Amino acid sequence: MARTVYLETSIISYLVARPSRDLVTAARQELTREWWGRRRASFDVYVSEAVIAEARAGDSEVAARRLAILADLPLLEITAEVTQLARALAKALQLPQRAAADAVHVATAACHGMEFLLTWNSTHIANAELRPTIDEVSRYSGYTPPILCTPDELMGG
């Protein structure tokens, strides 16, 4: 049985974005493409309606490329349990309203038992300072938190 990965929207965005001149962004784009090409097949990959909604936003041409990538990926349902955990996470992490979707991504992955949540969002998701709170709230709510990581961390040995 393959290991499970929830893809947060930043992964899809980096995957289809035009090449960046910014060195950090360009490196992330390359790492994302490398993970997609070399490692994606090693995992059962999932997204949620929250990812679809975020992927639809912005430039219509780029949004269409993001949605094309997402078309074949299975969707995890945003259940009442996901919503409840997302609210608890947002409150505990003191997330601004504009970051509410970040809590939904973490909650979706936790409630559906995903092993990993793959993201480039280090502000509110793959953030070492927030991780203890994410773990505590998830476990208190009865869920095992996913491992929050970036593509370079999930590249394999």
Image (cartoon, rainbow, N blue to C red):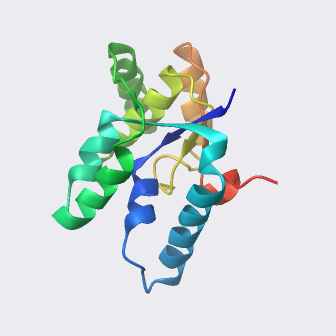
Identified at 51% across, 55% down, the residue is 122
Looking at the picture, how far across and down is residue 155, in whole percent?
70, 55
Does 89 sit above or below residue 33?
above
Residue 59 seen in the figure: no
Looking at the picture, how far across and down is residue 141, in whole percent?
51, 15
Residue at the right extreme? 157
Identified at 56% across, 56% down, the residue is 36
Foreground residue, 135 or 33?
A: 33
Looking at the picture, how far across and down is residue 114, in whole percent?
57, 29
Q: Quadrant of residue 144?
A: top right
Identified at 56% across, 50% down, the residue is 127
Identified at 65% across, 58% down, the residue is 38
Give the quadrant of the N terminus.
top right
Foreground residue, 90 or 111?
A: 111
Give the quadrant of the C terminus.
bottom right
Does 154 sit above or below residue 145?
below
Residue at the left extreme? 60
Residue 55 seen in the figure: yes
Does 143 sit above or below residue 148?
above
Looking at the picture, how far across and down is residue 135, in whole percent?
60, 30
Total label count?
0
Q: Using residue 73 as the reference point, say whether residue 52 is left or right of it.
A: left
Q: Using residue 148 as the reference point, say whether residue 103 is left or right of it.
A: left
Foreground residue, 7 or 95?
A: 7
Q: Using residue 129 as the reference point, say whether residue 109 is left or right of it.
A: left
Foreground residue, 82 or 66?
A: 66
Q: Quadrant of residue 5?
A: top right
